[in-house]
Image (cartoon, helix red, strand yellow):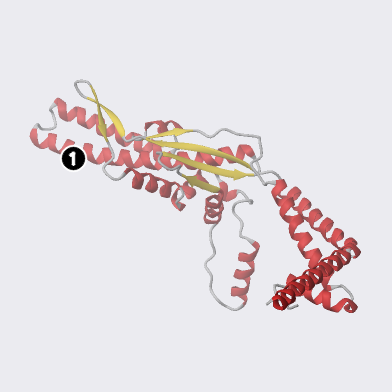
Amino acid sequence: MTAQLKIKKNEGILAQAYYEEVARKTLGILWHQKPLIIGILLLALSAASITLVLIGPRYSSQAMIQLNFIRDEPATGVKTQSIATVDAVALVDSVARAIRSPTTASAAVARLGLDKDPDFARESTMWRVLLGTRAALGMKAATPTPRDLAANRLMRMVTVTNPPRSYLISVAVTASDPEQATTLANTVALEYLRARMLQQLSDSQAAAERELNQLSSIYGVRHPSYALARTRLETLQNRLIALRNAPDDDAASLVTGQSFVAAESTFIPSGPSITLILGLTAGAALGVGICLALWLTPRKQTRDKVAIVGGCAGQNVRV
């Protein structure tokens, strides 16, 4: 029993000595190959720095849409009435989906004329190569319009979020220009609200037409109630025509159940994170440099090198 314990103890000592020797020789190899490792590190950091300079700072701006589930209606006094007929969470989610929809993005593109902006209305290089290849092979491919391209680019720039347990929806845009980010965020939110206002006016117009028909059948066209309803219907029709023909930012404050908080420009960059990018680059470069240095070690240091490189490559090393 004592002999077995001594054998196991000796095996442990030998294994420890072996790995200490491997570690010592590994450090010696790395120290000998330090110019290679430092060169790879400096090259990677230089490439990352040039990339950061080319990308430039990014600025974020966000507009807010607050959902209110009550409204005030004039009667003998002012009364408060709930306007939510579905689950509030589902309603918030549907609003967020409508904001990030292609319809809203297309309306924002038309309002700002982004389909004439070459930064928005252009195809990616990979997509152009794909279309060119299909054309060379005689295959048909649908060509997107400048408006479609601009809307797709805008949708990628817009982020719509809803904080948990709140009825607040954030419409955020990140761009290289803080003023452009603010304009895009406000325009997307306002175009959604304009679409909601058009829908509400259309519903009010349909209700006014039904009321007018009822008054006509009951009182006739000469009754004051009919004349008042007719005037109200004409007013709604004029508002609909005006809102369809020309965007009206003031209409955002008239949408029932929703309020708008405009985005403001901020000149503090939101990204990219220089420290994080350079740190990850340095870590990856050191890893590549160490593995490459071990692979390039002369074969005369075979056993130790094979053990080290095997571990670097994810292989099992046997003692």
Q: Is residue 296 above or below residue 71?
A: below
* Residue 317 at least partly seen: no
Residue 198 placement, left or right of 109: left
> Foreground: 90 or 24?
24
Q: Amino acid at mark 1?
A: Arg
Can you say whether 18 is above or below 90 in the image? below
Count of marks, rendered view = 1
Q: Residue at x 13, y 34 (%)?
A: 215
- Image location of residue 106, percent across then percent down: 48, 50
Horizontal and vertical percent position of residue 168: 43, 38
Residue 133 spot, x, y in % from top left: 62, 74
Residue carrying label 1: 210
Report the front residue among 20 and 155. 20
Q: Nearer the viewer, residue 107 or 244?
A: 107
What residue is shown at x 52% (from left), y 47% (from top)?
A: 159
Q: Residue furthest left?
A: 218
Residue 236 visible: yes
Q: Is residue 258 above or below residue 75?
A: below
Q: Please, which residue is most extreme toward the top here?
A: 77
* Left or right: 216 in relation to 197: left
Q: Quadrant of residue 285?
A: bottom right
Q: Quadrant of the N terminus?
A: bottom right
Which element type, helix, strand or loop, lies under badge 1?
helix
**Residue located 72% across and 46% down the image:** 275
For the C terminus, the quadrant is bottom right
Q: Tell me residue 111's x, y (percent).
A: 51, 43
In the image: residue 304, left or right of residue 122: right
Corner quadrant of residue 268: top right
Q: Residues within 10 Å of mark 1 (few under 14, many from 20)?
A: few
